[in-house]
Image: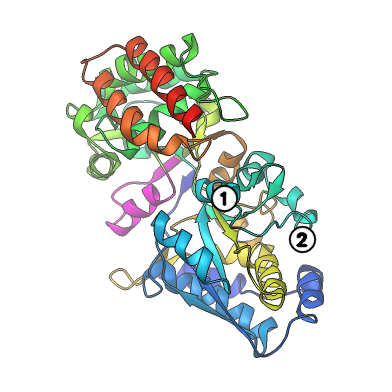
């Protein structure tokens, strides 16, 4: 699929077509909830970005629409936030009248600590609108503490011009063998390298490699999260494929590069492919669209997609009045109308255009107006069905930082073997999980 440049005119048209117009069927439930809410309160909505940023302002428009349609005097106030774990914990304990946007791993962490409201019964009917794999990430100990709202998935992006010059038909890239053949063809017939690859000691190396580990049939931990399962032949094969096969087709500096550098190589047409989220497309658009970007779902080549769902959650000690208001607000934020509004994107004053920064998570959006206009978005949403989970349990986060990321980098530069790395992760990981 190809994502054509979104001009200001088209976006304006899309905005008109995709206004948050509320049909009775879409919002009957929200209207019912509203009747039980006191009309004298203000609830805060803490996002993980600055409220004055482009994406903060994009979210503000959705909040404003909710306030206009449903809140009356019981308004929702958008406030800036971040992902500082300690700060969030303090707020959850002290600031009870707030709906929080939290990464899925934080939902599991704080849910285990008993700091979040159990939302299971209030959103049981909405569960079917999301992929089970995503819904499960907001659930711990059988209780739902986070409701999926927006996020990202990774896809295989390609430069249409370079593939055309190399005589590569992207529709024939259907597995890893045909993908590697495409990389070879690009290098033989153009001046570009095949793929932009990450190898630096950073957050990026973890999720990039995990996509192949999951795709090859490996796992990081068991279902209960108390035992490391990564030390397997599948994981070894995945890491060696990434290092030895893809590495042979990557930019010369790949072992020291993060995703930031890869995006620059892709934009400069020095590499033909990159594994990136929807912002990989926006980056090309913002820089004059020197080429058209094509998108291939990772599952098409046998790889799982890194996902980053952001969840809506509320503190355990929230008052009953605020709880009812938050339930109505969350119902609206995951409605088709509000989910579609996410695709309007954030405004760039520099380019006088709107660009997507994340994707909605509902799986039933293919027939919405925005999806019909830009069907490539659906490819990213479908990535949630075939996920690679970078932090499968909260206790994995310190393992990832202390051992996993630096260990993978050591593998990529040839300092240790994949087998040695996996044995080390099994040993140190099990120590950490048992201690937790």
The residue sitting at 79% across, 56% down in the picture is 121
N-terminal-most mark, 1 or 2: 1
342 up-or-down from 30: above or below:
above
The residue sitting at 57% across, 50% down in the picture is 113
Residue 37 in sight in this render? yes
Q: Which mark is residue 74?
A: none
Taking 32 as reference, is 169 left or right?
left
Residue 47 in sight in this render? no
* Location of residue 316 by image quarter: bottom right
Residue 63, x across and y down, in percent: 56, 76
Label 2 belongs to which residue?
122
The magenta span reads 277-294
373 up-or-down from 408: above or below:
below
Which colour style is shown? rainbow
Taking 103 as reference, is 166 left or right?
left
Taking 206 as reference, is 225 left or right?
right
* Mark 1 to mark 2 CA distance (whole Å): 21 Å
The answer to if 293 sits in the magenta stretch is yes
Front residue of 315 and 290: 315
Q: Residue furthest front?
A: 435
User: At numbered mark 1, what does the secondary structure look like: helix, strand or loop?
Assistant: loop
The residue sitting at 61% across, 58% down in the picture is 116
Front residue of 430 and 385: 430
147 up-or-down from 69: above or below:
above
Residue 262, x across and y down, in percent: 27, 39
Front residue of 345 and 320: 320
The answer to if 263 sits in the magenta stretch is no
User: At numbered mark 2, what does the secondary structure look like: helix, strand or loop?
Assistant: loop
Residue 378, x across and y down, in percent: 58, 48
Label 1 belongs to which residue?
113
Residue 310, x across and y down, in percent: 53, 54
């Amino acid at each position: 699929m190809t994502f054509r440049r979104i001009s200001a005119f088209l976006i304006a048209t899309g905005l008109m077509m995709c206004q948050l117009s509320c049909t009775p069927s879409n919002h009957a439930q929200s209207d019912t909830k509203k009747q039980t809410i006191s009309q004298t309160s203000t609830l805060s909505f803490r996002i993980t970005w600055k409220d004055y940023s482009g994406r903060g302002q994009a979210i503000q428009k959705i909040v404003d629409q909710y306030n206009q349609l449903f809140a009356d005097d019981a308004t929702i106030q958008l406030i800036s936030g971040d992902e500082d774990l300690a700060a969030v914990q303090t707020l959850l304990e002290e600031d009870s009248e707030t709906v929080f946007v939290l990464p899925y791993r934080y939902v599991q962490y704080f849910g285990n600590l008993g700091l979040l409201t159990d939302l299971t019964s209030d959103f049981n009917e909405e569960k079917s609108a999301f992929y089970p794999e995503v819904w499960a990430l907001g659930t711990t100990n059988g209780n739902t503490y986070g409701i999926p709202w927006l996020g990202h998935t990774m896809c295989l992006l390609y430069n249409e011009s370079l593939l055309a010059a190399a005589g590569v038909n992207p529709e024939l890239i259907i597995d890893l063998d045909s993908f590697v053949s495409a990389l070879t063809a690009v290098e033989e017939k153009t001046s570009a390298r095949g793929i932009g690859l990450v190898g630096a000691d950073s957050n990026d190396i973890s999720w990039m490699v995990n996509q192949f580990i999951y795709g090859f049939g490996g796992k990081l931990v068991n279902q209960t999260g108390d035992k490391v399962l990564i030390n397997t032949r599948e994981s070894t094969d995945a890491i060696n494929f990434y290092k030895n096969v893809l590495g042979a087709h990557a930019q010369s500096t790949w072992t020291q590069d993060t995703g930031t550098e890869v995006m620059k190589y892709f934009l400069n047409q020095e590499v033909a492919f990159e594994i990136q989220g929807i912002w990989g497309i926006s980056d090309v658009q913002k820089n004059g669209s020197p080429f058209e970007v094509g998108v291939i779902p990772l599952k098409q080549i046998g790889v799982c997609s890194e996902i980053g769902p952001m969840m809506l959650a509320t503190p355990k000690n929230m008052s009953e009045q605020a709880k009812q208001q938050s339930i109505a607000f969350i119902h609206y934020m995951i409605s088709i109308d509000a989910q579609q509004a996410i695709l309007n994107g954030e405004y760039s004053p520099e380019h006088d255009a709107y660009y997507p920064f994340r994707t909605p998570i509902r799986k039933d959006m293919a027939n919405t107006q925005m999806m019909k206009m830009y069907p490539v978005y659906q490819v990213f949403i479908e990535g949630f069905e075939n996920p690679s989970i970078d932090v499968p349990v909260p206790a994995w986060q310190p393992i990832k930082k202390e051992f996993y990321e630096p260990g993978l980098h050591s593998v990529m530069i040839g300092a240790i073997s994949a087998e040695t790395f996996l044995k080390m992760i099994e040993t140190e990981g099990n120590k950490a999980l048992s201690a937790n």
